[in-house]
Image: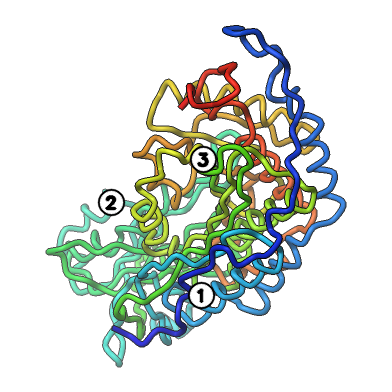
Amino acid sequence: MMTPHFVLPMFFAGLLAGSTAAQTVEPFKPAAKPGAEPTTTLAQQYREVSERIMAATMAGNDSFKKLEQLCDDVGHRLSGSPQLDKAIEWAIDSLKRDGQENVRAEPVMVPHWVRGEESCTMVSPRREPFPLLGLGGSIGTPPEGITAQVVSVKNEEELEALGDAAKGKIVLFDNPMQPYSKEKGSGYGTTVRFRGKGAILAAKKGAVACLVRSVTAHSLRSPHTGALRYEEGTPKIPAAAITTEDAAMVSRLQARGIPVTVTLKMEAKTLDPAPSANVVAELRGSQWPDEIVVISGHLDSWDAGQGAQDDGGGCVQAMESINVLRKLGLRPKRTIRVVLWTNEENGLAGGKQYAKDHEAELANHVAAIESDGGSFRPEGYTLECKDADREAVAIEQLKEITNLFASFGATRAEKGGSGADIGAMKPAGVVLLGHDVEGSTYFDYHHTLADTLDKVNPVELSQNVAVMAVTAYVLADMPDRIGSRPQTQESNGASK
């Protein structure tokens, strides 16, 4: 085992004197006769308090200040790195200063991959360096590098058609990502498969290394990294991403019958797992404190750029959401728990460890929200739940909640994915929500050196804080759990 960069804090509960001083503010709730249906919608019930939350948030909050500290003072935060250790310490200190309750680090062991020095140089038909980012988890090359001819293919079918022609060569997967469209979204889900399994496919054909076209539809010769997979029984070969421009050029040269040879050098290596932690803080509920609504983002990032959009913004959205509520003296009936996940990018160890550590209380997790799509203008939420009936009810209730965000244009409420980290809670029946934003430019910066603070609009970041704060408050305060059909009892026990 490697020597830890820092000693993880183990006991943070009960550190904050006076943190329970906020008063309980009860939103209007209509009177109902036994057995009668509620006479107002959630939007009507929570309109006044939601407008108060949104107005206060947009008038001023500390989200951009927090993100500036995380990005400029800490920087990128790859699992196992001293920078991630520093980010954990920063988050704990920041949450304590805000007066949050039960601030703590929950230990997690994470993968520890180190990039080292790397380069890719085209040596024929002419000499030119290619910008390069090795894929997370890749092995390295021999010290002298690997010099070999490149064969370019668009997909699995073209690779298969090569037969033995890929043996001893470097396979390039030049699969363009489709431009973003409002109807179809990004083409990320289709194109990213070559980043994930390209090294496996190429190795099975006898290739000595693998290159992938960066997973983006727009590039200024910027490579995009990300995690790969290896397969037991298949040789491990080095793998890296090159820019869309260079991938396209190699394919054009090959189409004209001009061989392309490159020298690939990578010092990448995987070390022993390292200690890390999820960071947790709470706004304790006034009536049912053991029932929990999680709001979250992931604190780790790739070792390129500053991790501003992916996912520093998601973290400060969650941190500032409970800060806004606390400053307003708003304490919902249930507990709102902030979780800043570790190791989302190359292992999901944080989400998995949380589900394991909190297994006994997952039945009391009412909902979980994750923001991991950037901090662009909010558009609403997508939702999923293991129980189809509960999911259907929850979506209808979510539509009432997002109706509160019409002024932001954030009214989306539909079935869809949620978040990679909170996905580990799905088997327990937790209602999972993905915080959705306008994502037309997200993959321009995703996993690149360009994912920096200047790409975040402070007004849009504040809008996301406002939407998350209201959503968390309503979910934590509504008479019945989301996904449960409305009850009229003073206690919510019948709806569990």
Tell me what residue is drawn at x 60 percent, y 67 percent: 15
Q: Amino acid at mark 3?
A: Glu
Q: Earlier in the sequence, mark 2 or mark 3?
A: 2
Q: Residue at left 29%, top 77%?
A: 139
- On screen, residue 410 above or below 123: above
Q: Disc 2 designates what residue?
A: 156
Q: Nearer the viewer, residue 206 or 192?
A: 192
Of tags 2 and 1, the one toward the viewer is 1
What mark, if any, has residue 291 been given in the picture?
A: 3
* Dots 1, 3 in contact, CB < 8 A: no
Residue closest to the far left: 233
Residue 423 located left or right of residue 477: left
Residue 354 position by quadrant: bottom left
- What percent of the width, then of the height, locates residue 430? 44, 37
Q: Residues within 10 Å of mark 1 (few under 14, many from 20)?
A: many
Question: Which residue is identified by label 1?
Answer: 84
| Element assignment for label 2 | helix
| Alpha carbon separation for disc pair 1 and 3 | 30 Å
Q: CA distance from mark 2 to mark 1?
A: 37 Å
Kind of residue indicated by mark 1: Leu
At mark 3, the secondary structure is strand
Kind of residue at disc 2:
Glu
Q: Is residue 120 left or right of residue 489?
A: left
Marks 2,1: beta carbons within 8 A: no
In front: mark 1 or mark 3?
3
Is 201 in front, or is 446?
446
Seen at 39% across and 40% down, the residue is 426
Name the image quarter holding the C terminus. Answer: top left
Q: Is residue 178 above or below residue 271?
A: above
